[in-house]
Amino acid sequence: MHDPEHQHRPHRHQQHGPPEPPLPVLVPCAAKDQALLPLVLQRLRRFGQGLGRIVVVSSKPPAFFPEGIEPFEWIHDDALPLTQRDLQHWLGADAAAGWWWQQLLKLHLLRWRPDLGQRILVWDSESVLMRPLHFEEAGRILLHPASEIHAPYTAHFSTLVPALQRWHPRVSGITHWMVFDAEVLDDLIGRVQSHWHMPFWQAYLAAVQPQWRQQGGASEYDLMFNYALAYHSDRYQLRSLKWRVTGDLNALRASSAAPRDQRSTEAYLTCHRHLRDRFAEVAYYQCW
């Protein structure tokens, strides 16, 4: 695989220019989240402020499309320059290639598809918006910190980018969505390829600790959060958001009918599959 030649992409205006162009959205979706995907898309279109085309990447198209979801695009996961089969060959048969592939998809899509523009909202297919939310302010990307610290993630990004350290010892970027900027990604990819002398995706996997190569050894969000604040802090602004992790799909669906004055104070909920499967057994789940 090689990096495609950079093409001209539309730039987003800075603080005093015209209104920002609509922000495209990438939603990678594994089979485990197909049942939740229509609600995820519906809430993005209903509550996401300043959003444009929604792009879903999966092995099969969504079972149905919520009304009013357009503009919308579906991409088969085999139609992209890097596939899960490529990763399986690199990682071995026992690795969760899909888990690694979705991270690399997020980090590469603006290179593969420069027509999408300068920035893209990357959104996990397990996360559901609960109230109106904007993602940029005065030309800056809004980041919200999390407190989940996973040592293998720190080890990975400090190996991948040797000078990179955690921005704050008790803060991470593991928030299940983030706005990615093409120029920041280009800088990261160029820096990594210059250091490792191999394609970025191979370096990304090579930097994983051997005991974590199956799954759980890196986070694209934690990497980008710390890299952005270390090298491009002028493009970002921190804010605090209330959110939590849950497995209660019934509560998610019921909340969509709530009157405005009874709307959730949480900006979004993340519904991991293992919690959806075990929800009846879970009395409480710590969130950040």
Image (cartoon, rainbow, N blue to C red):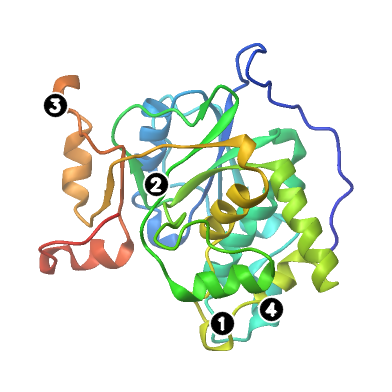
Q: Report, in whole angstroms, how far the alpha carbon at label 1 lies from the one at label 4.
A: 9 Å
Which residue has dot 2 on it? 37
Of callouts 1 and 4, the N-terminal one: 4
Q: Report, in whole angstroms, how far the alpha carbon at label 3 lies from the one at label 4.
A: 48 Å
Q: Which residue is located at x 57 percent, y 69 percent?
A: 100
Q: Amino acid at mark 2?
A: Leu
Which residue has dot 1 on it? 213
Give the left or right position of residue 35, taking residue 172 as reference: left
Q: Report, in whole angstroms, how far the alpha carbon at label 1 lies from the one at label 2.
A: 28 Å
Q: Nearer the viewer, mark 4 or mark 2?
A: 4
Of callouts 3 and 2, the N-terminal one: 2
Give the number of the disc on residue 206. 4
Where residue 88 appears, x then y in whole percent?
Answer: 64, 78
Q: Do the CB atoms of the residues marked 1 and 3 lie less than 8 Å apart?
A: no
Q: Nearer the viewer, mark 1 or mark 2?
A: 1
Which residue has dot 3 on it? 262
Give the class, few, some or many, for how many residues have Cα within 10 Å of label 3's Cα (few <14, many ≥20).
few
Give the left or right position of residue 277, taking residue 186 as reference: left
